[in-house]
Amino acid sequence: MAFNLQLYRQTWQRLNNSQIVTQQPDIATSIPLHIFDSISSTNTKLWEFIDSGIETPVGAIALKQTAGKGQWGKSWVSSDGGLYLSVGLDLDLAINKHSHIVMATAWGIAIVLRHYQLPVTIKWSNDLILEQRKLGGIKIETRNSQHQITQAVVGVGINWCNPVPAIGINLQSYYQDKSQKNITSLEELAAITTYGILLGYRYYLSVGIEQLLIDYLAILSSLGQQVMFNNCPGKVTGVTIEGKLKVRLRSPGATTEIALAPGQISLGY
């Protein structure tokens, strides 16, 4: 399957000329993309680019991945028809702000998808949800130096027309019974995603974590969700500025609020 870079760049320009958010940064130059028919992992390829001295931001798209990277070290074969891309960035952030990158990029991608009339929400901390099913996920890897995050690779997978499990949804099936199809190509979806990554990150740098967190919570589907933690029932009440999930636990005669890091609790679908 061919990838039309001209259409990708045209979509990027339309996005930059749109009013997606207030205080929208001007990012007129599209991220250069390298297209591969099949590679093991776009994240791995981006680190190779960075190690070779290539200028960032830069992106890579695989029409198929044979060892895509997921959370907690998982890998899988990414079948034809999905969007599998990674973007490399140079950063200068304190090492304790890793979660800010996670929230900024998830929010940025989601808010641009919503600009296209897709009712996308975020499942803590960085899954993209459409009609209560998983549309996509984000995997961020970073490198640190002297207590600073200096580089990041943001890997994103979004279901376009690829087969998905029962908990998933792809855009092709979502649009089947819709009168209007606002996203019509993989190239447009790639522009939306890469633009969203930069938009989210630069917006965060402009407004700070407190405002970003307000915006992130506004489209977080996990708020109010009933959960179990250590056999104790609870409810999701928010997210801390450190990116931890706030859960209010209930026990006979008492309640307590705790903050859980990614990996300490699974919210399910």
Image (spheres, rainbow, N blue to C red):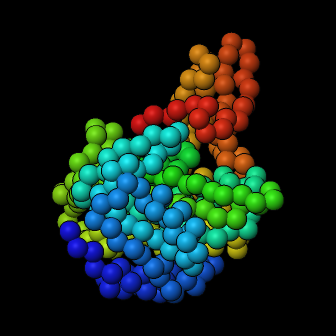
Could you tell me residue 232's position as x and y percent? Answer: 61, 18
Could you tell me residue 181's position as x and y percent? Answer: 24, 68
**Can residue 120 be seen here?**
no
Could you tell me residue 184's position as x and y percent? Answer: 25, 71
Report the front residue among 220 and 147. Answer: 147
In the rendered view, tell whether residue 229 sits above or below residue 239.
above
Task: Say which residue appears at 67% left-offset and 35% top-offset.
Answer: 260
Report the front residue among 124 and 97. Answer: 97
Q: How many marks?
A: 0
Q: In which quadrant of the rendered image does the C terminus lie?
A: top left
Q: Quadrant of residue 157?
A: bottom left
In the rendered view, tell whether residue 59 sits above or below residue 247.
below
| Left or right: residue 131 compared with residue 45 | left
Report the front residue among 1 and 259. Answer: 1
Task: Say which residue appears at 33% left-offset and 39% top-offset.
Answer: 167
Q: Quadrant of residue 251?
A: top right
